[in-house]
Image (cartoon, coloured by chain):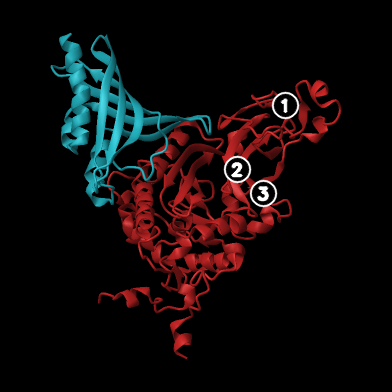
Amino acid sequence: MVKSAAEWGAPPKFPVTHYVDSRIYTDQAIFGEEIDKLFRPTWIIACHESEIANAFDYRLFAHPTGVPLIIMRGEDMKVRSFYNICPHRGNTLLYDPAGNAKRITCIFHAWSFDTRGNCVEISRAEQGYQGRFCKEDAGLREVKAEVGFGGFVWVNLDDASCTVKEYIGPALDVLVPYMEEPMEVFHFNRAVVNTNYKLWHDTNSEFYHDFVHYFNRITGMMQPGYFDRKYTAFPNGHASVGSMSIQYDKYEGSRERAVGWPGLSPGGWYMVDLFPGMTYNLRTSVLRIDTALPLGPNKVAIEFRGLGLKRDAAEQRAQRVFDHNTIWGPFGRNLHEDLLAVHGQGRAMREGTDSRWVIHGREENSTIHDEIGMRHFYAEWSRRMDRPSYDPFREGRMEPARAAA
Amino acid sequence: MEQRRQIEELVYRSCLALDDGDFKGFLELCDASFRYKVTVYSPEIRKEMVWLDHDRAGMETLFTNLPRHNSDHSPLTRHATVYTVKVAGQQAEVVSALQVFRTALDGGASELFTVARLLDTVKLDSGTPKLAQRVVRMQTRQLGFGSHIPL
């Protein structure tokens, strides 16, 4: 039955935990609050340790708050992070996205900094400052950085934050046994899509959308064990999905994955979604990491990384790359479908379209098509934002049952 | 000169076939030993990457499976210019510049999708030149929501 304007605008007939107001995906003020409340004080993956394997290696990271960061391995092999901003005249210190630098020297006036963020040279300091300002006054702003959970480099702008371990809690326990060996990034791709970052994370938090993926329907949904996969919710808005055995040979032109992953059963597949926008995705022979970096209410940059084992022989690595590209590469079967789907959501939900609600109402005993992953995310979102996701502007919305009473 | 003209025409025909979604026609331009690769260097991780790698059978399967997938239907238009042709014996190494434009179905706006080079190996031992290998060496790395269609 079609809906009138009033019916379209009325809340869905679900408990308030089972839908959200679409304006949380489009409103500029809410977006600004999300950056301050969700991203600024949160641990976010900036890169992987293999990207800065050697002393003096660095990697740049555009933090969602807008702060440009340097991730750097010092001569003591410790990983640190600093603002990529010269304390003198606010210039960019390092320009290339990655490199190796014994000194960080600003091209503008040649102020120079070591890998610990200390200023080691102010050009013509004595002549200009006569002792009123010296190297000790000119250090870089250091940001908390930790390496962990598979060798990823996590950063947090909040000096008073908890540790990464405290933030993740038990959410990654299911993957820890598979991340004991050193890994290496072999794939990096950044996709910028006109959609809200939460919609990408939603897609990673529910498997009901396997209907968009021919590959997943054939190799997963139509195979035994698929509907036994279960979601587990963890504190801080994280959630994981249990494994099954994917039947890769059911897709024409595909075959059973020969390389596999140490300790993981053949065809195994675990996923862990971390609040507010990161996903660990260990699928048979490749670990994929998504990091959603919001650029605006309807714009997100998603960084995709593919990882193999550091000890891979050339043939093994080539096979992992092939496996990765088949479904997850920029020309892969699944990634394009997922990106197209969230692009479509962004197109239908942008400001002014009168999209009103997004329903997360499926309950299937926490199994694979249950939408508990998203409900759990929005419970945490509401708590941290101090705004109910079903009524973000506190317009007095309540459950239909309670309203009737 | 006639040989160079034939080689250039092969490159241009391959682009036209892909533009038209004539995948059978594209494969007819390829030798049985054909290998197709998309490669790109990432300054972020400072590594060479392979984004697609198929032999002829793999390409055939990729094309056969296309209708089973949900894909963006905006046409891609390839603009190639053959820069150099080096013939050595029964094969030629061909370097071409490639730009690919994507045209939105709704409204028809065209935007640059990618900038790349085509590094082709062409077999000359039969009457007609055939593609033995194509490496699409991409410069562009940000492809938005991507594509299911090879470049």
In this view of the protein, can residue A347 be seen by the observer? yes
Of badges 1 and 2, nearer the viewer stands 1
Chain on which label 1 sits: A
- For the residues bearing labels 3 and 1, Cβ distance under 8 angstroms: no
Q: Nearer the viewer, residue A258 or A72?
A: A72
Q: Chain drawn red, letter? A: A
Q: Distance between the Cα atoms at labels 3 and 2?
A: 29 Å
Disc 1 residue type? Ser
Please name the amino acid that badge 2 sits on: Glu
The answer to which of A32 and A198 lies nearer the viewer is A32
At mark 1, the secondary structure is: strand
| First of labels 3, 2 by sequence position | 3
According to the picture, the residue beneath numbered tag 1 turns out to be: A112
Share a chain, discs 3 and 1? Answer: yes
Q: Are marks 1 and 2 in contact (CB under 8 Å)?
A: no
Tell whether B123 sits left or right of A369. left
As displayed, is residue A398 above or below residue B65?
A: below
Residue B64 locus on image (x, y percent): 22, 44
Colour for chain B in the figure:
cyan
Lateral position of residue A88 relative to residue B19, left or right: right
Q: Position of residue A339 (x, y in %)?
A: 38, 50
The image quarter in which residue B135 lies? top left
Question: Which residue occupies 52% across, 57% down?
Answer: A31
The residue to which callout 2 is attached is: A181
* Residue holding disc 3: A157
**Label 3: how many Cα within 10 Å (few below 14, some 14–19, many 20+):** many
Cα–Cα gap, marks 3 and 1? 23 Å
Pick the quarter of the image with the N terminus of chain B: top left
- Determine the chain carrying the residue at label 3: A
